[in-house]
Amino acid sequence: MRTSIATVCLSGSLTEKLHACAAAGFDGVEVMDTDLTVAYESPKEIRALSERLGLAIYMFQPLRDIEGVEPELFVDNLRRAEAKFELMRRLGTDLVLVCSNAGTATVDDDAEAASQLGRLADLAAQYGIRIAYEALAWGRFVNDYRHAWRLVTMADRPNLGTCLDSFHILARGHDPSQIEEIDGEKIFFLQLADAPLLDMDVLSWSRHHRLFPGEGGFRLTALLGHVLRAGYTGPISLEVFNDTYRQTDVRSTAAHAKRSLTSLADQASAAHGWDADRLPEVPQPQSVDFAEITGADLTALDETLHHLGFTFRGTHQTKPVRLWSWGDARIILNEQSHGAEPQLSGIGMTVRDVEAVVARGLALGAERGFRRTYTGEYDLKALKAPDGTHIYMNDVPAEDSWVPEFRGGQAEQRSDAQVDHINLSYRWHDFEEAVLFFRSVLGLGTDKGENVAGPEGLVRSQVMHTADKALRLPLNLAPPTAAMPPRHIAVRCRGILEVAQRARENGLSFLSVPDNYYRDLHARTGLDPEFLGRLQDLDLLYDEDHDGAFIHFYTRTFGGLFVEMVERVGQYDGYGAVNAPVRLAAQREPQHAG
């Protein structure tokens, strides 16, 4: 499969975009007319740079508002098109995208539109150029790919074909199965974009909210199957208009885009039983092996974990690293980061086949994570998530692999405590890439996203998880102008009221909860006053639904993280979202932090 991306997807100058696309591993690009217009390099120089980088210029785009016009205007359109054909010859590409007329069309006559497309194709043939005609979702008279195909067949020129764009097809709810009725040799180009399922005008939706494949709600795997079964053999290209992607770092966005295409090709091959473009198949992670916190001085976290009920398991034999555990909940405190505030820097996961997960991650463009390992120490393999968080993989039980490297600690009493979930926060320009990483590399699914009201704006939350919920990763998107929300590790235990009482008696302070919360909680739930009083005395929060209840509390914040203790009662499966605004507000007020 040859891969391509439209330069409009990326930030920066045209030369910066070309370098980023080559570094990401794309085979070629679609050059957008505006990118070339504002470039200081000539078309010949852009062509030479592309050749040096190993990039094909698959298409130049777009020619707008050509067909369906009065004769005198069409003559001017031919003059305009000829200037572009001359430019394309210097640029070194033989394919141009012609969009259905959305602005100047006044003649609603298929025969006339086909005739004008034919005359345009005849002119293009003199320059050795092919035309890919595309139906825009907001085209004046042509807004359906089937209509565009009819005009192509009516014009009947060898250098005139169609361009299929997933957004224009799926945003209008058109049936993509009829793509298979198109002659594959006349499908000159395929453009792909995902998008959230929004109820808004298609032009605004298209111009601002497209996403890379796997990040929205479109069924791109099925559409790609129809296109390939029709006989299409050309490049698979991305055309994604998105305000965020056009502001983010060009190299990371290009890598992000390439990962989305690689993942889509793998999903399509799996869905349709094809052998090509398959990645190593790996089962979803089985559980959380550990969470790693790094910082220059983590003494306060030692004290907090001790008061919560964790057992100190010892110090690493060669590094300033300590291990605390409570049942299967293991937290590593790593003080190798000089001068840094505490932060959640790594997540260990138990998997069935480490090498397969690493191979899949590398094929999807992830970087290896480095961990210094001395002779005789267990070699934990890791991949780096896009934000730098290390994702460690282990297919050997912790007690038989890396735990014995910690010395001088205590034996732990048996417990069924475990990591319930790990909450990761991201800035606005990293969020979608994180979702795609965890979905494509680890195969995690998603729950419906929620918006949580915070004192600095809405925080968008998207939970990613394995099918059995053994691994849960709520991802939080910070408001654009707000500080980054702290990350946190949530530990599930039994008897949380006793856990909280013991920790309080040991001198541990929790995140302080305002009295107004408990008045509202009583009004919402009608809880027994005595039980409500115990919750209030201990600063515990509560939620319930028809399946059960959720009781939890938060420690104070340490740098960029905190610890949450939770108990699930019955079959409650949520995360206490109703309480999130209380937590966000309390964390913003230092005087109430503990």
Image (cartoon, grey):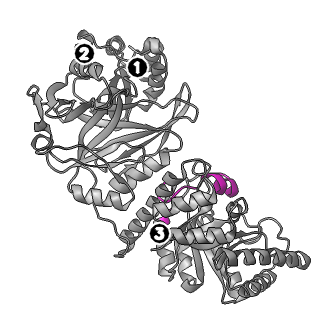
Q: Nearer the viewer, mark 1 or mark 2?
A: 2
Residue sitting at 47 percent across and 61 percent down? 23
Q: Secondary structure at mark 2?
A: helix
Task: Residue type at mark 1: give it.
Answer: Gly
Residue sitting at 80 percent across and 82 percent down? 116
Distance Cα–Cα, label 1 vs label 3: 49 Å
Residue wearing tag 2: 503
* Quadrant in the picture for the N terminus: bottom left
Crowd rating for badge 3 (residues with CA inside 10 Å; few <14, some 14–19, many 20+): some
Residue 254 position, x and y percent, is 51, 57
Crowd rating for badge 1 (residues with CA inside 10 Å; few <14, some 14–19, many 20+): few
The relative height of residue 93 versus residue 442 in the rendered view (above or below) is below
Residue wearing tag 1: 526
Residue sitting at 38 percent across and 50 percent down? 438
First in sequence, mark 1 or 3: give its number: 3
Considering depth in this image, is 290 or 205 the residue closer to the camera?
A: 290
Considering depth in this image, is 22 or 236 the residue closer to the camera?
A: 22
Q: Are marks 1 and 3 in contact (CB under 8 Å)?
A: no
Q: Nearer the viewer, mark 2 or mark 3?
A: 2
Distance Cα–Cα, label 1 vs label 2: 27 Å
Specify the quadrant of the image occupied by residue 157: bottom right
Residue 576 position, x and y percent, is 39, 31
Residue wearing tag 3: 222
Distance Cα–Cα, label 2 vs label 3: 54 Å
First in sequence, mark 1 or 2: give its number: 2
